[in-house]
Amino acid sequence: MSTLVIPGDEISIDSERPVVLGPGMYNDPVTQRIVPVNAGLLNISDSKKGQTIYVEYDSKRYSPAVGDLVVGIITGAFGDSYRVSLSSFSTPVSLSYMAFPNASKKNRPTLVIGDLVYARVCNAEKELEAEIECVDSTNGSDAGFGLLENGMVIEATLGFTRSLLFNNEFPLLRELAQHCKFEIAIGVNGKIWIKTDEVKETIACYRSISDCQGQPQEKFQEIIKNYFLQVTNTVEE
Amino acid sequence: MDAQTGYLENVDGSCLYSLNSTKVISAVTGPVEPKARQELPTQLALEINIRPASGVPTTREVNIQDKVRAIITPILASYKYPRQLCQITLQLLQSGETEPYFHALELIACVNSTTYALVDSGIALKGIALGTTVVISKDNQLITEPTDEILKNSKSMHVVAYMIENNKPSNLLLMDSYGDFDENDILKILEQSEIKVNQLNKTFREYMKEKINNI
Amino acid sequence: MADIKESTVEVHPVSFPTDILARISPDLSLQRHLSLGFRPSSRGFEEFRDVIINTGDLTHNTQSDDSAVKTPSNDGKQVLGSCVLKQGDVFVITQITGGIIEDITLSTNDMEMEEDTELLEITEEHSDITKYSSVYPVVEINRGRMGACTDEEMTTSQRLYDSLLHSHILTQNALRVEPGVRITNEDDSVNIIYPDSEKNKEITSLLKPKKKWSYVLYAKIEVFGRTGPVYDMCWNSLMAALQSVKLPRTFIDERATDLKMTVRARGRNAVVMETYNLLCDPNESTNLQLRENCISYASSYGAINLDPEADIANLEETDDVDAPMDEELETKTVLLADIDGEAEETCIKSTISITACPNGRFKQFSVVGGGAKITKELLMRSITLSKQRSSDISLKVQKV
């Protein structure tokens, strides 16, 4: 079920059962009221353990949350960690040298300032500096994490990147795959990294993804086709 | 009244707002890293900048800033963002009032516009703040959303802003009155502005509904 | 998680002297005081600080009986009115200075008001804001350090300006300069004729130029020893100072008026104005005409929710039944008059500031409701108090 909520609205909650609050929900420390703090669609799901409530809303600025997959830019290097920016002007997060696969005291990662990394948020307390890692510490897998070489980064809204990453029905990537080969890393912090064999294809992908934002899904095919036509034409001329 | 959110590309939340001939763009950025002197250990710091439609900011703009801050601070869920900063910039495009004499219309445009932009930015809010201007004319009529001409010839003018929680005005956030009036006038003004704010709230909800359905 | 050892931590109660606790935890300190029924300053909830007002002490124009002592005017800039106000530990010193500017906004209503100004003023409460004027206040809060002015100083100054303008206390007419003419008689004696009597009026209107001048008033308000919000003190001080303002009379030398005639032949342009030499009379002055029924005085209030947990007396009683306590204890909101002190200023987020005339009309009213909910009852109570306070202060000013 999803209904529109505005910050401050009353939400009917079964107070007898445990409640899990997701994004967009807040328990006011003073009044102890549970209220939505963002405008969006309210989702309440019931499970045996309790009720999960969150608000689905779109925004541009990313706040770290544990488990999120993000694309970050290395902005500094310290004795035992990198400083990584997940979105411009936000408080940077840290990436420890030990949070890489096969890391040891001797075996240091070789990232430099300006590099892009694909990582997972492993610690996000609001009072502390958030931490990210290039290996999934919950299951030890390291597939896909780490340095992102070459390619290009597309900035998008958080809602759009979530759709790309989690919604298997979302047709954009499937449509794109019909035109060219590409590698992609989607960070829910609103950054999408894409790499193709040729520059013109990268440009076409970049423009297609940027433009499909905020457009209905039926239009995707047409937009993508258009851009790929443009780049192939330019080269032929 | 007309509002359009997401008007600016490079900020987190923005709104182009116009009411009669007052027009303002608001831009919200946050939560971002504050300068050391702005940082609050447990709360979200708030920085508000108002740029006038012409000329450089003066004490008049500082005064409006102060009032916008008084209205916006209580609606932010500020303990959710310790040591962070929310920056609000308001650029007046058209004043809509005789600037040396008044600031009521600009103040209300700034407040309402900021509310739209804050919701657009996704910063956590405990409620929303909406306000209106009411004047008492020479013949004791109550007029909401006056024009400059009405302001000039009014007996008293009042700016009222409410916090809206659970779809209704819950708390008086600001009342700022100048002129000549008595306590019955104050009660009448509060009543009248509550009705008006309810209407504004309805418009706000409809706008948000449409915006979210479009995604 | 498993290897966290249980360790016992001994907690020693830490105690602080009252004033240190008040700085560390102003909220707690304030709540404890309030639960005992008084405020940190040991005032009652609705008790104001005492006010002492002295006006005119710093004024240049203090009439000296010795006519030989004639202080020359320094190009129109001198203290025309003043007030020293002491409220609690705070001093507010207001000095009103002035200048004369040429009135270039010669609107049509100036012309028609020429003759029956006074009549108009009595018969009609006219509201057109362009007919009123204000003073230009500069508030300076002294904290023992230099630097750019703070936001508080700027907002206070701006609020004073706005409130004064919209209170309609000063008409543009009251600030109009009515210049006299200095005439050199045949026997070389000099005397100045002011347009006071009908006969003199005729002479001056013959000689005086068509140009108009206005006084502008500046108020320099200095606050010493700030302990809390200052707006109401600044307003009251400004109000008292304005009532003591004496505007110097001005005149034009006969020769200058002669000069005028020749220059006027060339037509009206900017060059003409400079030939009039407006001089201030060191001996003569007139009282600034304020609209008496618009004189108003300000007071401030704060609303705060009493924290039931800070109520020690109650807590001890209900200690045994601690379970349902939270539900039953209703938060009570109290009104505090005349906010002062660091604890009150930082903890009270809901404030009411009222500028009231002794006759019960209001000139400025502002409510900020960031904290405790401002109910109708609180508003009404503060309104009643503000009227009393306004009458009190007006008596004090009159006594001076």
Image (cartoon, coloured by chain):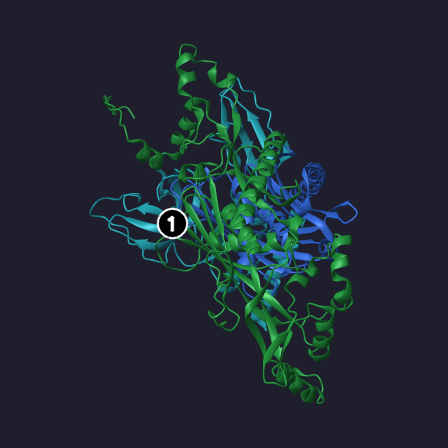
Chain colours: A cyan, B blue, C green
Residue A168 in view: no
Q: Is residue C26 above or below residue C214?
A: above
The percent coordinates of residue C98 (x first, y second) are 54, 65
What subunit carries mark 1?
A
Between C271 and C357, the residue placed more toward the observer is C357
Determine crowd level at label 1: few under 14, some 14-19, many 20+ residues with C-alpha closer than 10 A. many
Q: Report the label total.
A: 1
The percent coordinates of residue B162 (x first, y second) are 62, 39
- The quadrant in which the C terminus of chain B is found is top right
Between B176 and C13, the residue placed more toward the observer is B176
Q: Residue furthest left?
A: A106
Amino acid at dot 1: Pro
Q: Is residue A150 above or below residue C303?
A: below
Q: Quadrant of residue B188?
A: top right
| Residue plotted at (43% across, 50% down) | A90
The percent coordinates of residue C241 (x first, y second) are 53, 54
Between B26 and C335, the residue placed more toward the observer is C335
Give the residue at mark 1.
Answer: A92
A136 relative to C132 in the view: left or right = left
A111 relative to A55 in the view: left or right = left
Between C46 and C185, the residue placed more toward the observer is C185
Residue A33 in view: yes
| Residue plotted at (49% across, 30% down) | C45
The percent coordinates of residue C357 (x first, y second) are 63, 44
Q: Is residue A118 above or below residue A201?
A: above
Q: Quadrant of residue B91?
A: bottom right
Q: Is residue C216 above or below residue C353?
A: below
Q: Residue furthest top?
A: C320
Quick one: SS at disc 1? loop
Q: Residue furthest front?
A: C187
Q: Quadrant of residue A229?
A: bottom right
